Image (tube, grey):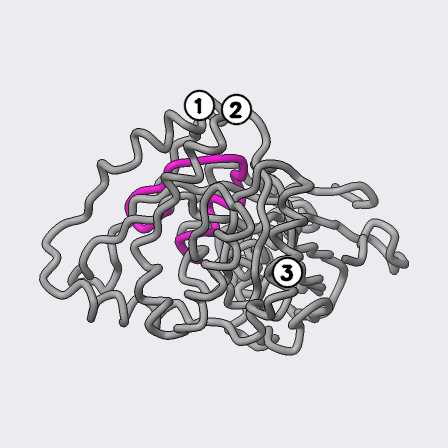
Amino acid sequence: MTDLRLAPRTGREVRVRAPGKVNLSLRVGPRRPDGYHPLATVFQAVSVYEDVVASASADLRVTVSGPQADRVPTDASNLALRAARALAARTGIDEGVHLHLHKGVPVAGGMAGGSADAAAALIACDAFWGTALSREELHEVASELGSDVPFLLMGQTAVGSGRGDLLTAALSRGEYHWAFGVRDEGLATPAVFEEFDRLAAGREALDAGGDVALLQALRAGDAPALGALLHNDLQDAALELVPDLVETLAVAEDAGALGVVVSGSGPTVAALARSRQHALVIAAAMTAAGVADAVLTASGPVPGARVVAGSDVL
């Protein structure tokens, strides 16, 4: 990945890095009348990053580089631009900004790359414009943008409820190592939820009580126990839409993963490893078997969106 701290500087800039995420557990209730599904989830932020640089511009605009950059919209639907607009509206700012996104998180891969862009854009624009919002105020803006955006401001490990935006920090000991099997063709989150609704027809309530043991494993730093408890209610829906993921899951399991799960709405497959070296072994196995278009390794938990070295902050 290009380190934007070493990129050429062109005037005043603010540089922010935000992580992707993996849902250690994701439990989904039936669709509500407002169209949303209640969620109970345990997030972990991992060391796969989006880098966002804010610089001067006469208007609000976005450019993109990095893997799968051609799949990221640069029009008004871009989540980083939406974040900038929301912050400007909240604070009465009438200035432009150029946001350059360098992608590191898979696009439409269930690891919240777009939400990481939005979280980074909020931090970057707040610093660039000197609006000085509190973390609580930034969280409020983030909640308007999407379910994962507040967590990617926060980072580390957290329990999410509501739409995933109501967060409680979770105690987690130790470092966890991951291998991710990535697909070139992403999955649209609405399509996955639609398939979930079809498969879960008749389900009456959200099962929010199944993660006590998982949280105990995190507190104890017990990676094998955590691996056995990874859970995703959306996994069956993702497998219906991309049946080949069954083979990806199987290859990671055969490589000795402590646990394997589809990340979020997919199609990225997340495999928990015994160590950093074992994560490389799992990634190599997925590559050799041809069950992923790309592989990544990462560790977690890591902090949320943060200004990085080389920034000019008011």
**Looking at the picture, which amino acid does disc 3 mark?**
Val
Magenta range is 145-164
In magenta segment, residue 47: no
Percent of width and height locating residue 252: 52, 54
Percent of width and height locating residue 137: 47, 41
Q: Disc 3 designates what residue? A: 295
Q: Residues within 10 Å of mark 2 (few under 14, many from 20)?
A: some
Left or right: residue 301 versus residue 277 is left
Real-space Cα separation, disc 1 to disc 3, in angstroms: 29 Å
Q: First in sequence, mark 1 or 3: give its number.
A: 1
Real-space Cα separation, disc 3 to disc 2, in angstroms: 26 Å
Real-space Cα separation, disc 1 to disc 2, in angstroms: 6 Å
Q: Quadrant of the C terminus?
A: top right
Residue drawn at x 44%, y 63% as measured from the top left: 266
Left or right: residue 118 versus residue 25 is right
Left or right: residue 230 versus residue 91 is left
Left or right: residue 225 versus residue 51 is left
Percent of width and height locating residue 180: 57, 55
Asked if residue 26 is positioned above or below residue 184 in the image, the reply reads: above
